[in-house]
Amino acid sequence: KDCYKLDGIVVTASRIPTEEFSANANINIIDREMIKANHFKDLTDLLKIVPGVTIRRYGIGSGYEQAEEIFINGSKNIVVLIDGTRANMNGSEFAVFDFGALKNLDNIERIEILKSSASTLYGSDAKGGVINIITRKAEGNPKTTLAVQKGSYKSEQYRLSSSGKYGKFGYSISAQKDKATSYKDARNFRVPSHMNSTSLNLKIDNEFDEKSNLSLAFDKYTADYMYTGVSTLAGISKRHDGNADNYSWRAIYNHKFNENTHNQLSIFNQSRDTLYDFWAMDLQTIGFSDQFSAKFSEKNELVAGVEYYQDKVKNYNDGYDHYSNRKMTNTSYYLQDVWNVTKAFNLTGGIRYTRHSKAGNNTSLSATAGYNINDKTNIYASAKEYFIVPN
């Protein structure tokens, strides 16, 4: 089934709902229908089918939360969003996002993958692009599903999901257990391996009225694992043991002043506590963002916002270096203005000012021009600056 549609509405390219065909960006959408049809094992299994997206995996049972890296068009400088809220963990140069926390795909509505620099709107690390994971809204009467799956490498998966709506209050909850044991490789050699992980996702929504709603979400991922790899020092096979205890929460408040004016306030926290052999890292990122969007006329739309987050290494130990309570802060202000000069021709300009506690100040600019030749052909050209801050 083809997942690349030209008539969908996307929000990642401009932070304003826009027809994908006219978004002037290289975007792929994986919708709910495709997720259901393909029975993806987890989030990384889904993302690896997208052209230009690469997942670097180190084998079965390898402790996905710290070993997997994701690249868009060869760059690992990307921003991951959940419902438009930043979900990056910048304390480590390994995985920028805990993919294990969202293994259960039952409550994901769609994923938008923006494959180009978007640093004006999304800040540092958006050189390669943006992955926006949009969760499902609870609708209708409560419904519960249970699934069991077994596969290659003696893997097992048990999945439970439930969602529903009571008046203005909605909920969704999902839990997943993944197991894997020793397996035989292509040469029929037995490879010692172990994985036992549990993920839990909870989301509640409340509609105060037609103009405002509040969403609260909590994600937790725990795992213990062991895999056999080659020691870089001795050149021999070695078993590696580890565990993880990661969680995150976010609160998102949306308010619509009128049909053309909207504000979204988000507060978020991510924590990742990983132990791998003698290597240990305990990270935390906290922050908030506020975004205002307005459509002044059919020809002019504007997005403005502020974003603040703090990355903190609560504890680090690799057997040689040991330190704790190191932190960096990032504060940004951004503005993007879209002008529909004619029905077919549009111009977009953007600016972002960043103040970073370690890297100093920076101003990034962007400009895009797009032209719809007809209802099947759209061309655009863009120039964008990006600012990558240290880990």
Image: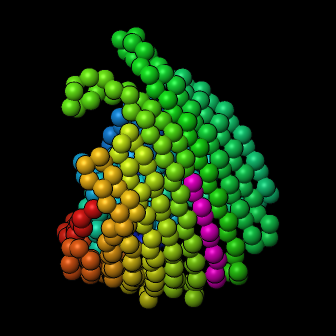
Is 363 displayed left or right of 149 in the figure?
left
**Residue located 50% across and 70% down the image:** 268
Q: Is residue 324 visible?
A: yes
Residue at 62% of width from left, 51% of height from top?
200
> Left of 77 or right of it: where is 151?
right
Q: Residue at image x 68%, y 57%?
A: 172
Q: Quadrant of residue 116?
A: bottom left
Q: Which residues are magenta?
A: 211-220
Does 64 sit left or right of 76 as displayed? right
Residue 70 percent coordinates (x, y): 34, 48
**Residue 212 in the image: above or below residue 270:** below
| Relative image position of residue 91 (x, y in whole percent) | 34, 60
Where, by quadrant of the figure, is residue 120 drawn?
bottom left
Seen at 43% across and 15% down, the residue is 190
- Is 5 placed above or below 185 here? below
Name the magenta segment's main secondary structure. strand
Tell me, what colour scheme is on the image?
A: rainbow
Q: Nearer the viewer, residue 142 or 357?
A: 357
